[in-house]
Image (spheres, rainbow, N blue to C red):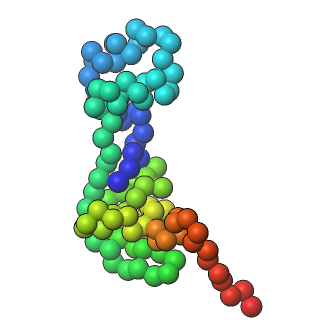
Amino acid sequence: MGYPTGMISMLAQTGDDFIAELQADESLEFWGIARRLSEAKFIRPLASRGIVGQRSESAVVYDADTTHGGSGGPVLDIDGNVIAINTAIIPEYGGSNFGIPVEYALPGYIVFRDIS
């Protein structure tokens, strides 16, 4: 789940009237436009479904449709719990995607590696 196509995609879905309204307000900057998009209910995350094919200590591999720009978005299980953070896509590898297990992002989580 995330916003991989950014604000341009959201603006493209608004319609001519909304764009004309934004253009008339020359004082708007990025966050002002984002606020107006949010108030008009045009900000909606992209969500897709997939299957987790593998989970290891360092990676979660899944086949949900994702795209460039989706890194950092949450990977959810069927109950809505975050299980990973979207990290990379490899379209040549059967559309597989890779995430970092969510434990790495939790407060106090320390990774010890044996470097000997």
Q: Image quarter for residue 64?
A: bottom left
Which residue is located at x 50 percent, y 27 percent? 30
Which residue is located at x 35 percent, y 70 percent? 62
Q: Is residue 33 above or below residue 45?
A: above
Q: Image quarter for residue 93?
A: bottom left
Q: Quadrant of the C terminus?
A: bottom right
Residue in the foreground of this view, choosing between 83 and 9: 83
Q: Is residue 34 above or below residue 49?
A: above
Residue at the farthest front position? 108
Residue 29 seen in the current view: yes
Q: Position of residue 23 (x, y in %)?
A: 41, 13
Question: In this rendering, would 46 be left or right of 5?
Answer: left
Which residue is located at x 27 percent, y 15 percent? 17
Residue in the foreground of this view, choosing between 43 and 64: 43
Q: Position of residue 90 (x, y in %)?
A: 44, 66
Q: Position of residue 60 (x, y in %)?
A: 42, 74
Which residue is located at x 29 percent, y 26 percent? 40
Question: In this rendering, would 85 be left or right of 75?
Answer: right
Q: Is residue 68 above or below residue 80?
A: above
Q: Image quarter for residue 15?
A: top left
Residue 12 seen in the current view: no
Question: In this rendering, would 48 be left or right of 93?
Answer: left
Residue at the farthest bottom position? 116
